[in-house]
Image (cartoon, rainbow, N blue to C red):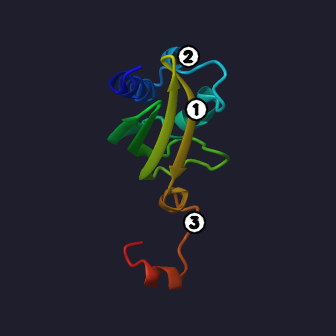
C-alpha cells in the first residue's frame, strides 16, 4: 500500500473513534489485532462521552504510520473505577500503527498518564514538585 493510503486508513480510524463507530473499527482493524480496540475504547467513551482525538502530526514510512494526537474530553462518567469528576482533560499521545494489506495489525502508544491523572485530580504534585514544575 502507498504511504498516503496508510495515512488515510489511520485518519479513518480516528474518525471512527471520534464518532464511536464500532462497525468502522471492525473494517479497519485486522481480526487478530493484539489490542482489542472495542474493549479499550468502550470504557473510555463511557468515562469521557465527548472524547475527541485530533491529529496534530502524521508521518508514514514503510508499513508504519506515526501519529501525534491531542485528546480532549470531559470526565462525566465512571472511568476505571474513578467516579466522574466533571473535569475537562487535554493531553498528548503518540501512536505508531502498522498496516498490512489495508488493515491495522499492530499499535504502540505513549501517553502522558501523569498529566492526565493530575488533571483529573487523582494525583497531586508535592510541594517540591510544584517548585520544580511551577506551571503545574
| Cα gap from disc 1 to disc 3, whole angstroms | 31 Å
Q: Nearer the viewer, residue 102 or 72?
A: 102
Q: Which mark is residue 26?
A: 2
Label 3, on which residue?
123
Residues marked 2 and 1 touching at CB (< 8 Å)? no
Position of the C terminus by quadrant:
bottom left
| Cα gap from disc 2 to disc 3, whole angstroms | 35 Å
Residues marked 2 and 3 touching at CB (< 8 Å)? no
Position of the N terminus by quadrant:
top left
Label 1, on which residue?
106
Give coordinates of residue 82: x percent, y percent. 63, 50
Of circles 1 and 3, the one toward us is: 1
Of circles 2 and 1, the one toward us is: 1
Q: Residues within 10 Å of mark 1 (few under 14, many from 20)?
A: some
* Residue 100 drawn above or below residue 62: above
Q: Which image quarter: residue 65?
A: top left
Amino acid at each position: 500500500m502507498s504511504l498516503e493510503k496508510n495515512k488515510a486508513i489511520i485518519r479513518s480510524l480516528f474518525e471512527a473513534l471520534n464518532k464511536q463507530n464500532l462497525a468502522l473499527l471492525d473494517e479497519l482493524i485486522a481480526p487478530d489485532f493484539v489490542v482489542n480496540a472495542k474493549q479499550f475504547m468502550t470504557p473510555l467513551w463511557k468515562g469521557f462521552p465527548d472524547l475527541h482525538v485530533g491529529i496534530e502530526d502524521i508521518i508514514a514510512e514503510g508499513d508504519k504510520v506515526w501519529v501525534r494526537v491531542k485528546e480532549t474530553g470531559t470526565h462525566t462518567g465512571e472511568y476505571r473505577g474513578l467516579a466522574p469528576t466533571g473535569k475537562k482533560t487535554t493531553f498528548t499521545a503518540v501512536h505508531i500503527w502498522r498496516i498490512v494489506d489495508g488493515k491495522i495489525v499492530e499499535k504502540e502508544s505513549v501517553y502522558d498518564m501523569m498529566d492526565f491523572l493530575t488533571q483529573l485530580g487523582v494525583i497531586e504534585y508535592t510541594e517540591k514538585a510544584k517548585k520544580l514544575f511551577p506551571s503545574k
